[in-house]
Every structure is written in structure tokens, then in C-alpha cells.
Image (cartoon, helix red, strand yellow):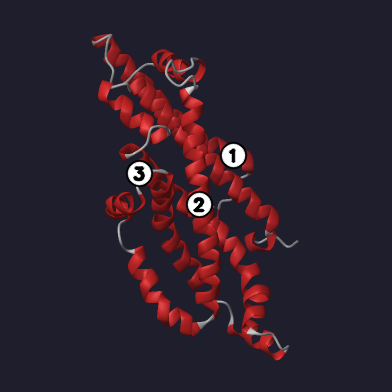
Amino acid sequence: MRWVNRKMRRNDRMIAGAVPILALLVLYLVMAAQRHALNPSDKILPLPDAMARGLSALLFQADPLSGHFLFWTDTFASLERLGLGLGIATLGALVAGLVLGVLPPVRATLGPLVTAIAVIPPIALLPVLFIALGLGETAKVALIVVGIAPPMIRDITDHIASLPREQIIKAQTLGASSWQIMIRVALPQAMPRLIQAVRLALGPAWVFLISAEAIAADTGLGYRIFLVRRYLSMDVIIPYVAWIALLAITLDVALSLASRRLFPWAHGASH
């Protein structure tokens, strides 16, 4: 049987997916052990016990100045910014995508503007946002919105505009207005695509969040990473990066499960 025709069971897929991750972990441990055999004080590739000690201070010891447990303070601050940015961008993408996708005159008028904004590197706008909005939370959330909303709008717009013309004609035959077509025809079919767009935007959203926190913040995962890098504290940086990856994967899996549960027809399910 050709590989292109091979189907894997769920357990087999999980095992196959775990193999490269475990291989990378083993490779890291081998390289770290070799470096520490030559230099016991090496900071570049810390061993697991050193990372556990470095992280435990942030996890379980309150900061003398603020009295907060820094790991959880950083996590909640970053998730709050990420959640606000994703929420605003998602709502904006849905509304704008529906209007542009259903109404050709609006798409012809505003489509080029959305495209122009989408191709601007959002990081280049970071100084502009900080100058215009200050160094507070608004600028950090705005960077996430500006970074991910335009590509999401383009995706939703293209998806809705490519819906079969027969559906629009049938809705009009039954007396539907443009508003009703937007809500009753386009919206239900846009929702699975919207969730997919959010999943694809998670990676860039984290990039913009970490970038903003690295430049102007006093809490957050990105802030902590760039703070401790001055001391080559890889025993803190690596666990923080792994934690960010775990949070991102959890969000992605949650969105995927929600899409399959809420819209099974969009994933090939018969009912």
C-alpha cells in the first residue's frame, strides 16, 4: 500500500507525533550532559535539575517587592493581553468579513485598504502604537489586533465571497434581504472558517505579544524572558518558552475540539 493511502488510528497518530518530540528531548539532554561534563558551570544548556530550581523560585516564592508569585503573575498578564487582542480581532474579522464578503461594492471599496494594511509588518508599527497610545496595555493589545485582524478579515472575506452563488440566489428568491443573507446564509458557514483563522493567528499573536512585552512591560512572559536574558538565565528562559508552547498548544487543541463539536458538518461528519 502506498503511503499516500495509509490511514492511521488515533493511538498510532499520538505515538508517531510523540516520537520526534522525545527525540529532541533526548538530543538536548545528551548535548547538555556533554557540555556540563566539560564545564560544570555551563549556563547555555542547563540540566533539568537546574531548570527546576530556577523555575521553582518564580513558582513558589513570593517576590520580596511585590509579594506576587512571578510565574503566575506573568502568565495571567500575558493571557489577559492575548485574550483581549484575540477577542477584538476575531469580532472585528467576523463583522468586516461578513460585510466585505456579502456586499461586492463594499469589498471593492475597502478590500484594497485591508490588503494594504495586511502586508505591513506589524512590528514596524510598534513605535507608532507606543507613541500614539502610550506604553500601557492599550498599545500591547492594539499590536495584536493590528497584526492578526487584517489577514483574518481577508480570509473570512474570501471564504464568504466564494460561497456558491446558488445559495445567494435561492435566499433572494425566498425574499431575503442583504442583511438576512449575511446572517442566515453567510454567518453559519463563516463560523468554522473563523475558528480556523483564529487557530492560524495564534502563532503570530504570541509573537506580537512577546515583542510588545519585551519592549515596554513590567509583567508578562515576554518581559520575564527578556529580563533574565541579561544574566544568561537559560534555566528560566527555556521553561518559560516551553510554557508558552504548552499554552499555545492547549489553545489550539481547545479551538479544534470546539470547531468539531459545534460544526461537525464542516469536518466531514455526516451528523
Is label 2 or label 3 in front? 3
Dot 1 crowding, Cα within 10 Å, few <14, some 14–19, many 20+: few
- Disc 3: which residue: 135
Dot placed on the residue nearer the N-terminal end, 3 or 1: 1
Residue kind at label 3, given as amino acid type: Leu
Q: Foreground residue, 74 or 97?
A: 74
- Would you identify the image quadrant in which residue 5 lies? bottom right
Residue 128 is situated, as x and y percent measured from the top left of the image, at 29, 54
Contact between marks 2 and 3 (CB within 8 A): the answer is no
Residue 54 is situated, as x and y percent measured from the top left of the image, at 40, 16
- Disc 1: which residue: 12
| Residue at the (62%, 38%) spot, across then down | 11
Q: Which label number is shown at residue 146?
A: none
Is label 3 or label 1 in front? 3
Left or right of 255 in this view: 31: left
Residue kind at label 2, given as amino acid type: Leu
The local secondary structure at tag 3 comes to loop
> Is residue 3 visible in the rendered structure shown here?
no
Q: Foreground residue, 99 or 195?
A: 99
Residue 114 is situated, as x and y percent measured from the top left of the image, at 39, 70
- Would you identify the image quadrant in which residue 218 lies? top left
Q: Which quarter of the rendering shows the C terminus?
A: bottom right
Left or right of 26 in this view: 252: right
- Disc 2: which residue: 86
> Is residue 64 visible in the rendered structure shown here?
yes
| Residue at the (35%, 19%) spot, across then down | 30
Contact between marks 3 and 1 (CB within 8 A): the answer is no
